[in-house]
Structures are given as C-alpha cells and as structure tokens.
Image (cartoon, grey):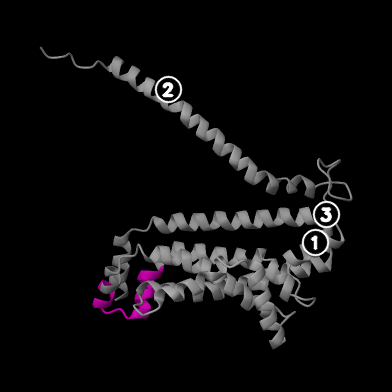
Amino acid sequence: MTSAPARPADMATGARRRRRSVSVPRLILYVFCAMVLVYLVFPVLVVIPLSFSSAQYLTFPPPGFSLQWYRNFFTRSDWVSAAILSFWVASVVMILATILGTLASIGLVRGRFPGRGVVNTFIVSPLIVPAIIVAIGIYFFYAQLGLVGRPIALITAHTALAVPFVVVNVTATLYGFDERLEYAAMNLGANRLRTFWHVTLPIIRPGVLAGALFAFITSWDELIVAIFISGTGAVTLPRKMWDSIRFQIDPTIAAVSTLLIIITGSLFFSAEMLRRRSERMRTSVVAEEAVEVA
C-alpha cells in the first residue's frame, strides 16, 4: 500500500516549523553581532557629538551646539599645515608602497628562488613586530643619517610600514589568477609589459586598490613612528593631535577626529565600489582585450 503524496498545505506547515526552529538561534546571533558592533563603533562615533559641543573642554553629553571647533581647526595654521603634510606624505607613501608591494607580490608568487619564505617573512615583519620596536630602530638609524625631523624620514618609514598591506592584498589576488590568460596574450604577440598592463593588472586591480587604500590609511593614521622621527619640522596630523591631547585639551581634537572618520569612511566606500566594478569583469572580456592588444 503506497503512502499518499504530501499535500502543499502540509509542506508549507513543515517549512514554517523549520523557519521557527531556526529563527531563535539566528535571532540570538543577530543580537550578539549587534552588541559587538555597538561595542566597537560607539567609542568611535561618540566623538562626533563632542565635536559640535559649545563647551570649552571635552564633556559628554555636550551642553550645547557649536561649530567653533571646526572653525578653529580650519583657521589655525598649525592644524592646517599638519593636515596638509599628512595628506602629502600619505599620498607619496601610497604610490611608492603600491608599486613596491605589487612588484614584490609578483616576485613572491611567480618567482622560484631559495629563501622565498624568508623574504616574505621579512617583508611582512612590520605587521608582526610591535610598532614601538620598529619606531626605536628607525629613530636610531635615521638619527645617524640626520633625517629626523624631515618629511623624507616619514615617507621612507611609512612606506616600509605600508608595503606589507599591499603585499598581502595583491598576493591573495594573484593566487587566484589564471596565468593562461597571460600566455594567450603573449602567444598572440603582446610583450610582457603590454600583457601586464592590459591583462594582468585589470584582474588583480581589486587587490592593488585595496592595498593602496591600506597604504594611504597606514601613513595617514600612523602615530608611534611619527612621535620618534617627526621632530618639530615635520609634524603630522596624528602627531599634532597627540601634542594637543597632552598640552591643550579642547573639542578641536573631536572635530579633527570626526573629519578623519568621514575621510576614512569615504575611502573605504570608494574602494568597495571600485572592487565591485572590477569583479564584474569576466575572464572572457579580459581575453578579448588581450587579443585586441596583440
């Protein structure tokens, strides 16, 4: 005797029961994630209302609303010069670290030479070694060369700190790269430079852009090394904020922090949009471009 087929109503009832059985653990997971998010984000976002405070010192909640601290930031030459220097140094570091990190990633992934693991460990060591140790070593080395207090010291030191972020991101992209596309382009007559520019680079672009973003942020937000080597002639924005906290506490620091949050968030949003745009590119499109280049 055969059993009767399940009716649609019974199937719908079973599906609802399964959804109810899963909803409780999922709800607990959502609540836990929300609590973790609030714990991580609240200390960052609390500076935003502080930046609009009418008080002459940092107090929460603010007693009133005022834009005087933003006006104070944009009208004081010491704050403006520190922001300009930080942006200039971070831009140069981003370019240098992206170029060096991308080339190093290609060499580490494609190269076959003894000691490759040691070289990779040496390159990413700034991510592992405590920043204070790196800062002390850089300070004594640059002091012997007379570079302390010069922008070139910040650029070279921040580049060394930023290269590992580029290497990590580009290397992860290269491991998923199909080298047959390069071989196809070169078999059709494209040289190595044109193959890299028109075939390899468009595919690894998400990793390169992410690495460039992290390189910029690494230099833009770096404080410990800047404390040691910036001196009085190359004061970056984080160093200026540190000095202000030590000697003159007012909500100008909160205003600067709010601007940094906006800038950093905008950079991450732009990088994500570029990453999604790059991911929509299909391998077939890149192969057709390689044929056109050849």
Which of disc 3 and disc 1 is earlier in sequence?
Answer: 3
Percent position (x, y) of residue 128? 55, 65
Q: Is residue 34 magenta?
A: no
- Residue reaching furthest to the left: 1
Foreground mark, 2 or 3? 2
- Per the rendering, the mark at residue 20 is 2
In the picture shown, does residue 187 fall above or below 176? below
Magenta residues? 184-201
Q: Is residue 188 magenta?
A: yes
The residue depicted at 51 percent of the width and 69 percent of the height is 124
The residue depicted at 32 percent of the width and 62 percent of the height is 285
Secondary structure at badge 3 equals: helix
- Per the rendering, the mark at residue 109 is none
Which of disc 1 and disc 2 is earlier in sequence?
Answer: 2
At label 1, the amino acid type is Phe
Secondary structure at badge 2 equals: helix
**Residue that numbered label 3 is attached to:** 69
